[in-house]
Image (cartoon, rainbow, N blue to C red):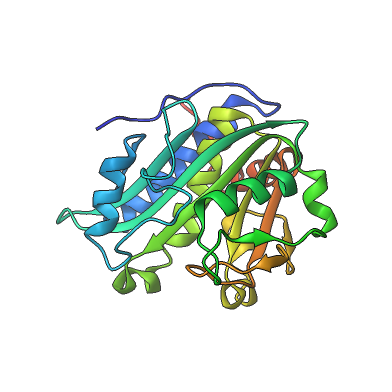
Amino acid sequence: MEMYEKSEFGESNPSVFARVIFGLESRLFELGLKMEYGSDFELFERFAEGTDKQALSEHFQVALNTYTPENAFWLRAVSEEGETVALGAVRLDLLGVQTLDRHLAKYWKRCYPGQFGNGATLAAGQPRYLREVSGRVCYLGELWVARLWQRKKVHIHFSPLAMAIALQRWNPDWLYCWVRQKMWCKRYPLAYGFSAVHPVGVRWHEEPSTIDNDLVMALNRRDWALDWMDALADEFPLVSRS
């Protein structure tokens, strides 16, 4: 199994990353779960096909994307019996000066089918916040937790773990994920470690046919995410060796 490679960079103390990642992995272990990581998305697709998730979204399907260890990774929580309990994936997009609204307009039309047989097409006027997002941008997606495990709150450890690893590995300027309306109402994005929520995530000219048309965006700037990491690290204090 290919594991992620830990890099130490960013504006936070490297020990903070170590404490948070180890602490979250330990909490999942206490629930009877072990973590696996990799960048082989054909394997990841097979994991998804073996669950009631059944398939990955267009964002991570290997038929539509080519990912390498340098720009994407997945994570999987596995029970003692070898059952897939949780899935998630993160990718890094190097937008440079291009803003997220322009990037999404190109990507969605190419990868997502629209309701009228064309590609899903964004409206000309997009929410203003999208024009603030550029540079090194991480997208977190494919979050899925097995139904029988949802009551054990696996997601409140699993999702922040994905964000912490992305921060440590890539030092992104921004991180975001799409959230369904009913999940936003339950304050899930805040539990996942996101600091800002935009109820009008995107505006459509031709709506997508395979996903919700009223997605909410959860967003983190790097500074916000590092502040969140500092606060989370306080839950995992350093152990004195004296």
Residue 125 visible somewhere in the drawing:
yes
Tally the marks.
0
Residue 33 visible somewhere in the drawing:
no
Q: Which residue is drawn at 60% across and 41% down?
A: 138
Say which of 83 and 67 sits in front. Answer: 67
Residue 48 position within the rendered picture, expressed as x and y whole percent measured from the top left: 29, 56
Residue 166 position within the rendered picture, expressed as x and y whole percent measured from the top left: 54, 37
Say which of 123 and 72 sits in front. Answer: 123
Quarter of the figure that contains the N terminus: top left
Q: Residue furthest top?
A: 8
Q: Which residue is drawn at 44% across and 40% down?
A: 65
Relative to residue 62, is residue 32 depicted above or below?
below
Instruction: Tell me the quarter of the picture where residue 172 sits.
Output: top right
Say which of 71 and 6 sits in front. Answer: 71
Relative to residue 192, is residue 153 depicted above or below?
below
Residue 34 position within the rendered picture, expressed as x and y whole percent measured from the top left: 28, 47
